[in-house]
Image: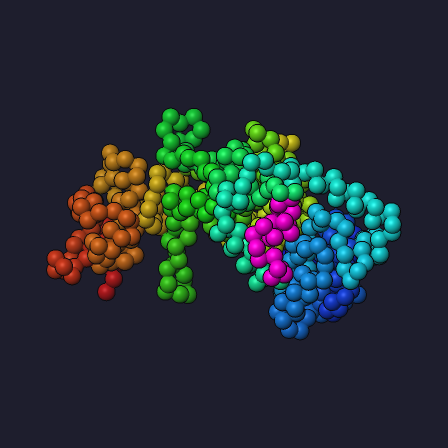
Amino acid sequence: MNSEQLIKSLLKQGEGEQLEFKQVVRKDAIGKSICAFLNHEGGQVLIGIADDKKVVGIADAEKWEKELTDYLNTTIIPEAPIMVSVESVGNKQILLVKVWAGSKQPYIFDGSIYFRKGQSTVKATSQQISDLIHNRQKTELHWERQLALGVELEDLDIHEIQKTIDRSINESKLDESKRNPIDFLTHFGLFQNGHFTHAAVVLFAKNPARFIPQTRVRVAFLEKGKTADEFVDDKLLDGNLFKNILAVQDFFEKHLRTTRKFSEKEWERQDEYVVPMSALREGVMNALVHRDYSLPSASMSVIIYSDRIEVFNSGKSPLKAAELKKSHLSLPVNPDIAHIVFLRGYIEKIGRGTIKIMDACKAAGLKAPKWTTTDTSVKLAFPLNVKLGGASDGASDGASDGAIEGVIGEAIEGVSRPVRTRLVDIVSIVLNEPGIKNIDLQERLKISERTVTSDMKRLEKFIDYKGSKKGGGYEPNKELLKRIDKKPAD
């Protein structure tokens, strides 16, 4: 579901407890509605929609996006993750303002507490305010807000905290007075009564597993499946949430091959991973932010198989698998963690991460990813269009890997899977870049000169070296071109 389809779906749905339409930007009215959504179950405001649900659009939408973001971040107390974005419908631009249910109710706008009653935004009654305060007291007992005893400031990664502070001040208009790390952590409830909370440990500890062992993340490449005796790569990540994001991305880059595509309209080559990195990143982020950290037996894993990639996490999803494929709003399982990750810019559009995963896979021509939810776990599986066989540091033409393997069959007979993959990569590169030098192949595939020379010896039936010793390069010969039915370049 792309953005335009999402907007049309919301228009068809009509106004209700979690959805409101505005024709023009009236900041005070929008502020009241967002405050009411925060005090209820979350919601969305579409701006640029007439009373008859016709899309009339907003002039200077990008200017209003920034101005409205700043306004809502400074007028609604306490701070909450508020997403404002420009969306396109046909040739019109509209604004979408979106919030989860707030975790620090009651929220106040312009000195008053607003609540949602059906399609209307109203001032909260004394009973409703009392209920909101009671709900907040219950959330204060949540695991992530419990105190992590024994954690000192030197146990935290001050650099990560400072990066979060800088971005919060620059992007979310956080008060400059919160620049001190302790003041910042106190402001967001991560430091209470002289102790850091569990959420602070998950987010910023240098070694969170020392205090909360279940924060570790397993990453593995199991080429032959769960019952195989040999693991290509298998390790436990024990960094904080931000370090683990980068570590998982490095793991993907290490083991996932790239497919090479040439646009019919443009000469530039595009190298893409077998699954778009944007989709993988969203899947991993969802698991890291929404997983259940409270049980000692809780876990998270990212496993690469030859035919799929699975992201697993402990915890019950508040939504069914089918509902995850639609735009959705809910109170995050770990609201304090989600809020800080939002401030860092890792959550761009609230409630749309799963849709971005679906869209990215569809655009890449992949089968739809599959979510499996139980009372205790969530698993996201990305089916692959190509088989992964061993780590590959280079690029290969996924679209023609099978064809190349068939063409050079005698050259790869009896070699190990990693060597076979590398030889296919070399043929693919030479076909696309005739004249490529030995040193360029070394750099591209991260292998030595000796390995390139050895591989070329094995491929001598298909690849020729032409030119001087220093200035020459490798080119596909007639035999190779004949087998793949491709005319040599002029």
Q: Seen from this angle, which residue lies furthest left?
A: 468
Residue 180 falls within the magenta-colored stretch: yes
Residue 116 appears in the figure: yes
**Quadrant in the picture for residue 289:** top right
Residue at left offset 39%, top offset 50%: 259
Q: Nearer the viewer, residue 429 or 115?
A: 115
Residue at left offset 65%, top offset 65%: 70
Residue 75 falls within the magenta-colored stretch: no
- Answer left or right for 35 relative to 220: right
Please provide percent x and percent y for residue 276.
47, 50
**Against 165, is 47 above or below?**
below
Residue at left offset 36%, top offset 65%: 267
Residue at left offset 69%, top offset 69%: 57
**Against 479, is 487 above or below?**
below
Count of residue discs: 0
Location of the C terminus by quadrant is: bottom left
Please provide percent x and percent y for residue 242.
50, 47
- Answer left or right for 420 relative to 478: right
Please provide percent x and percent y for residue 318.
67, 40
Range of magenta residues: 174-192
Q: Nearer the viewer, residue 196 or 287?
A: 196
Q: Seen from this angle, which residue lies furthest front?
A: 194
Please provide percent x and percent y for residue 271.
39, 55
